[in-house]
Amino acid sequence: MLVGQAGVNLKGFENGSLSFELKGTTGPALNIGFQTGLWGNNDCPQTINFVPFGPICSAISTEWTAYTIPMSEMIKCNPDFSDVTSLCYFSGTADIHGGVAEMRNVAFNK
């Protein structure tokens, strides 16, 4: 659990991966990853790091499917791994249609 505005220190995981199981009924693409820093904070700027899931890339199955995503594929900016403020980040990339995405067994690996 993250308390207040303090992030989790994941230094040492920069060359690791994020593992999880995913299933769902959502059609539009969504981004899954992690965030560091805080929005609107110049001293600790927010970075959003993700990979896309959806019809064009990794389609979301209605059955549980295991994924292991290397950090190098998710990093979009220069994340501060000593301040991971959102361990699991979801973001829709298209119109929401009422579908569901479920995730379980989330782990960061070195």
Image: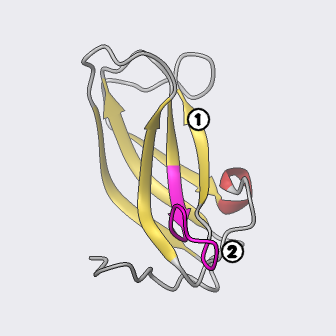
Helix, strand or loop status at disc 2? loop
- Magenta-drawn stretch, dominant element (helix, strand or loop): loop
Q: Residue at x 37, y 40 (%)?
A: 22
* Residue 107 at x, y percent in the picture: 42, 67
* Mark 1 surroundings within 10 Å by alpha-carbon count, few (fewer than 14), some (14 through 19), many (20 or more): some
Q: Which quadrant of the structure image shows residue 80?
A: bottom right
* Residue 46 at x, y percent in the picture: 58, 63
Q: Residue at x 71, y 51 (%)?
A: 73
* Residue 83 at x, y percent in the picture: 53, 80
Q: Which residue is mark 1?
A: 52
* Mark 2 surroundings within 10 Å by alpha-carbon count, few (fewer than 14), some (14 through 19), many (20 or more): some
Helix, strand or loop status at disc 1? strand
Instruction: Tell which of 57 and 10 is nearer to you.
Output: 10
Q: Earlier in the sequence, mark 2 or mark 1?
A: 2
Task: Locate the N terminus and report the quarter of the image it occupies.
Answer: bottom left
Q: Which residue is mark 2?
A: 14
36 left or right of 25 in image: right
Task: Locate the C terminus and report the quarter of the image it occupies.
Answer: bottom right
Asked if 83 appears above or below 87 in the picture, the reply is: below
Instruction: Tell which of 96 and 23 is nearer to you.
Output: 96
In the image, the segment drawn in magenta is 33-44
Asked if 98 appears above or below 21 in the picture, the reply is: above
Q: Residue at x 63, y 79 (%)?
A: 43
Q: Residue at x 66, y 61 (%)?
A: 71
21 left or right of 14 in image: left
**Which amino acid does the dot numbered 2 rest on?**
Glu
**Which amino acid does the dot numbered 1 rest on?**
Pro
